[in-house]
Image: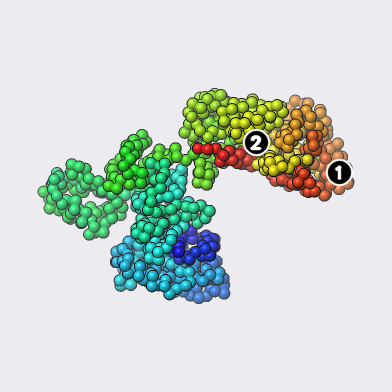
Amino acid sequence: MKVIKFGGSSISTTERVENVIRLIDEANKDDSIAVVFSAFGGVTDQLIRLSEMCSVGDEAYTEELQELEERIFRFAKTLIRAKNQSSVFAHLKSTLNELEDVLHGLTLIQELTARTLDFIMSFGERMSTFIICEAMKDRGMDAEFADAREMIKTDETFGAARVNFELTNRKIREYFESRTALQVITGFIGGTPKDETATLGRSGSDYTASIFGAALDADEVEIWTDVNGIMTADPRKVPDAFPLDHVTYEEAMEMSHFGAKVVHPSSMQPAFEKNIPIRIRNTFRPDFDGTVISADAKETQHRISGVSSIEDIALLRVQGSGMMGVTGISARLFSALARADINIILITQASSEHTICFAVTPSDAHRAKDVIEDEFSLEMQVNQIDRVVVEKDLSIIAAVGENMRHTPGIAGSLFRILGKHDVNVVAIAQGSSELNISAVISKEDETTALNAIHSTFFESLRRKINVILVGTGLIGGTLLRQIRDHRHPLGDAWKFDIRVTGLANSRKMLFDPNGIPLENWQDTLEQSSQASDIDILFENSRKYNLTNCIYVDCTASEQVAQTYPKFIEHRIPVVAANKKAASGTLEYYHRLKQLSHTLDTPFLYETNAGASLPIIQTIEQLRDTGDSILKIEAILSGTLSYIFNIFDGETPFSEIVRHAKEKGYTEPDPRDDLDGMDVARKLLILARESGYELEMDELVIEDFLPNESFEVDGIDEFFEALEDADSAMTERVKTAQQSGKVLRYIASLDGNSAKIGLQEVAQDHPFYTIGGGDNIVAFTTERYNETPLVVKGPGAGAEVTAAGVFADIVRVAKLQKQ
Ligand code: ADP
Ligand code: ASP
Ligand code: MG
């Protein structure tokens, strides 16, 4: 059996709740389960805010309460069909009335006790769990609401109640014994001996799940949240953080104790005692396995498992000459703090015993100071102990991991990194278990410190893919943006990091073996003092021993296309958006293919035809499985596709071209589209891929415009010359129309003969209706003989072309070995 818990983030909207109900329905089919819910995302915070407002008599609380009520009813209304709504609404109404009464009472007494706050917070879980349970019943599921206060029995430490396990375990087992329906349990709350409501501390629903799991001897406890598991660091603070497959109970406890909010530290205890694994999973990515927390430490290459932080702490320093050599000082100090229920996060004591430092949450700082000054008032009067110093605006960062035990040098590396990044360390502590080294630092250094530590301990572990990109025009620039935006979110699925180590345009270049920051590469490249030189980029990649390099060409340069063999010869794969290599001489094409084949080094150029449409891949797949390509018919120019789609003889041809140019649909000089050369290159590549040995001069290109239009000097002159062709073009389209046809610029291959030109196409032809600037390729093969295989869609534009190059890079990266 499994106990499954869903956190507030998994149920913060009605769509998310729907998704969760589907997940539960699936899980329920395979296994017997019980489910635990937190409050809807943000509700606990809102209840705390309401309590605080009421406790100072702030009347504006009524608006906040109204907002909460509306949100709660919206959930109920959306998730439950009208015919089942009335009893649900009645129950919610009375629950909310009860909440309103307590809050109103609080405005009168104006004193917020931990007991009252716990009671107010309990409404969050009680309402969310009730609504979701009703929604499940509404969908025909056999579900039953279970109020955990009846089973989890605690003491009266409101705010973080301690569980009476003996009683609780018995109650849970008794409760479950007589029930067959799926139990839908409120997280976070328990009941005291006087049957008052107490909470288990913030994030306590995780604990609830573990308590139930242990009592019921579950096989696994699952905690579903909004990240792919326990990560090497908080992903909101460390973008490079990645999920861990496995951690031990102790590691998880240390990390969560030191700020990794993803799971509540106490949750580990009940599961640990019964040796039940806890799995952290992502509600939004159920396909990921998540992180398993269990007793056995798995072999990893990591020296540490994670780095976490507590953003805001206060440090109290007690010092004085009278503390040296006197026994019992620290015992008195910490007993006094314990009596006052002050939680101590970290303690350090210098061996001179002159000073004791400890960290608490800032809200406890002044109370702690008072408690100590009270306890040691006598010693203070005679100056044996100085006044207590409180330092604020501090954070704690902690490196955690099983591997740290008995591994020398970790503390050394940690503090060296902090020093290197100019982070001042205020205090240091190492747990005696050696599972954790913590440092107190200034709050403003927190993110710097986290990222610096993370990159030192983890950077080298994930496989690095080193991209060397030449060409930073429209496509190269878009590609850099796509890599920048997607490499972190996708890195978890890929299990490798893509970084750009070399970057060049026609003038300048950059090289950084650690990866060029992609946030402002334009400025960095512009300011670079290195003149562009591909040979140097190549040499550098070898000099710095960069493994897993990929050479990417986003230029249109003949010269750059000549550099590929050198890279492939050194087993550096090549991805080209540039068509010049594959459409160069047949001999060069064969040489590259041969090299790539014998050295098992990919040379990919999917975007050479139809941007990211799967055209070259399709040919490859067909031929790999024994098919032969007999014929290809294609529209391969987005620009010409667009122009002939619009050209109906009403507007002169030249005007349409002018308009297309203004909209940026043509090359800067539209002749580069109209002369058919670009289409010819694409057809040549498709022919070669299909196994036809063709050279460019064997292609028949039928001009549809007079040569004179192409021979003039500038673009303005070209447009003037183009006007002279208008009447002939109009006549041509009108003639086609008379027989119900349209004009299309078609590239076709029939066996060994390839030609390109304007054709009239009838209504039953697949190219008759084609959208905007779409490309279309129809393959007639031995297998696809009756009806051709057709690939169709947007085949031009920076976004899709760059995405095609990106896809080639990822394909290559997946093939590369460590
Ligand atoms: P839930 O609402 O599901 O209980 P929480 O907000 O309590 O979710 O916890 C999940 C959040 O914990 C994540 O979104 C992440 O920002 C944060 N977090 C902090 N440290 C870590 C870490 N080391 N690994 C994963 N998540 C972490
Ligand atoms: N709703 C509670 C909180 O926000 C408990 C939980 O989410 O686990 O702290
Ligand atoms: Mg949580």
Helix, strand or loop for disc 2: loop
Residue furthest out toward the left: 382
Q: Is mark 1 on a helix, strand or loop?
A: helix
Q: Is residue 268 above or below residue 782?
A: below
| Residue 617 seen in the figure | yes
* Horizontal arrangement in the rendering, residue 673 relative to residue 146 (left or right): right
Reading the image, the residue beneath label 2 is: 605
Specify the quadrant of the image occupied by residue 456. top left
Q: Which of 232 and 8 is in front in this view?
A: 232
Instruction: Work out whether 12 lies above or below 698.
Output: below
- Does the Cβ of the disc 2 residue fall within 8 Å of ligand 1? no
* Residue 558 relative to residue 23: left or right: right
Residues packed near mark 1 inside 10 Å, few (<14), some (14 to 19) or many (20 plus)? some
- Give the spatial CA distance, label 2 vs label 1: 37 Å
The reply to whether residue 634 is visible in this rendering is no
Cβ–Cβ under 8 Å for marks 2 and 1: no
Instruction: Give me the residue at 76% from left, 46% from top.
Output: 783
Name which residue type carries label 2.
Answer: Tyr
Q: Position of residue 575 (x, y in %)?
A: 61, 34
In the displayed structure image, the side of residue 638 where residue 158 appears, left or right: left
Q: Where is residue 417 in the image (x, y as percent from the top left)?
A: 36, 36
In the picture shown, does residue 320 fall above or below 169?
A: above
> Number of numbered discs present?
2
Whole-percent x, y for residue 605 in the image: 65, 36
Q: Mark 1 points at which residue?
A: 736
Image mark for residue 746: none
Q: Nearer the viewer, mark 2 or mark 1?
A: 2
Q: Which residue sits at x=47%, y=52%? A: 290
Residue 434 placement (x, y as % from top left): 30, 45
- At 70% from the left and 28% from the top, the residue drawn is 584
Q: Which of 236 and 293 is in front in this view?
A: 293
**Vertical order, 816 against 711 (above or below):** below
